[in-house]
Amino acid sequence: MAAAVNGAAGGDTKAAFARIYDALKGELLKDPAFDFTNESHQWIDRMLDYNVLGGKLNRGLSVVDSYKLLKGADDLSEEEMFLASTLGWCIEWLQAFFLVLDDIMDDSVTRRGQPCWFRVPQVGFIAVNDGIILRNHISRMLRLHFKKKPYYADLLDLFNEVEFKTASGQMLDLITTHEGEKDLTKYNIGVHRRIVQYKTAYYSFYLPVACALLLSGENLENYSAVENILVEMGTYFQVQDDYLDCYGEPEFIGKIGTDIEDYKCSWLVVQALEHANESQKSVLFENYGKKDPASVAKVKTLYRELDLEAVFHEYESESYKKLIAEIEAQPSVAVQKVLKSFLHKIYKRQK
């Protein structure tokens, strides 16, 4: 199987990573546990390309990058590249599973600059089952390539744990939104932080590094400080996302922001509630969560009046300083490099 990544060592990581997707997809489409018809084969093939590809692949590629930094090597053997990339693709599959279902729950329109999967003609709610299949593919890939590894049980446990945390964060997001519709004062920074940590930070930040640590033969129990730093980083990343949902250009960020319409417990609305006077609060209570463009415009005008852009930039700069200090307190220089590479990828991002 390692031969599928011919020339990966020293070559272009992204190109080698992409080739491994084709190899993994080919294996899944020949899975002996299911007798594929032509139609089901074509469906899965198209569904995977539509949902697993098309993103920036940051989570998946960061497994490979982190593993290289932990090993202190620019080049990996074909076997190492294949295993690191397979774990990276497992995270991309997990991301696809979450997004397919998330878009249905949020009644979203676009994702990554194209219609959400469930909005594609003939797909509809078949997308729910596709989400389940995407999640099951992860277990298939892990079993196929890691079953004989000493850390196999730890890998399964890690993916299960992170999936549970993420689903619990999604639940919190959805039920808090219901509460917020009744009473916007339910939204505060503590509520926002809890949602974000569970819904985004674990799978986007902790999971790739934890995979690289397991590949390197490390015991995750020794890295709780690293876990905390990565969860902090993931929180900062989601605050950026909340900011870009309102201030980013849709054609640049690849989606139309709907946090205001969807009554989301966004960092911006939490800050607005904290900074607003009584008359400004009444504008928020009156217009937040309404679908009509006039109400959305009023909320955005209020955000401008409160200068939430400046509040965000101050938060961004403070977060960066705090994270750098925590990273530099880590005993392992290799681990510091991994954490700094994550931070520098996201600091002051525009999309």
Image: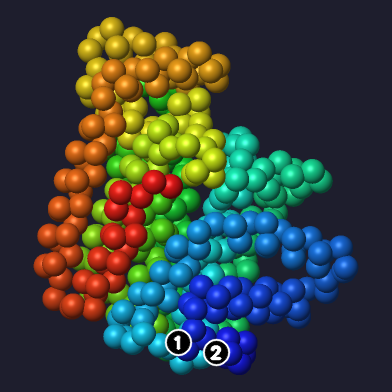
Residue 192: x and y, percent?
Answer: 32, 38
Q: Disc 1 marks which residue?
A: 10
Residue drawn at x 65%, y 45% as measured from the top left: 114
**Label at residue 189:** none
Q: Quadrant of residue 181?
A: top left
- Position above or below: 245 against 316: above
Residue 183 appearing in the image: no
In this orientation, which residue lies closer to the viewer: 186 or 112? 112
Side of 326 relative to 90 (left or right): left
Q: Quadrant of the N terminus?
A: bottom right
Residue topped by disc 2: 7
Figure check: 342 above or below 29: above
Give how far across and how far down residue 326 sits, in percent: 15, 61
Q: In this view of the protein, which residue sits in the foreground, 274 or 3? A: 3
From mark 1 to mark 2, how far is it between C-alphas? 7 Å
Pinpoint residue 28: horizontal percent, then vertical percent.
Answer: 69, 74
Q: Position of residue 112 (x, y in %)?
A: 57, 48
- Residue 177 placement, left or right of 307: right
> Which amino acid lies under the numbered mark 2 shown in the image of this protein?
Gly
Q: Are marks 1 and 2 in contact (CB under 8 Å)?
A: yes
Q: Secondary structure at mark 1?
A: loop
Q: Quadrant of residue 29?
A: bottom right
Q: Image quarter for residue 158?
A: bottom left
Q: Residue at x 28, y 7 (%)?
A: 279
Q: Residue at coordinates 68% horizontally, 48% vertically from top-left?
A: 117
The residue lying toward the viewer, choosing from 227 and 333, is: 333
Q: Is residue 271 left or right of residue 254?
A: left
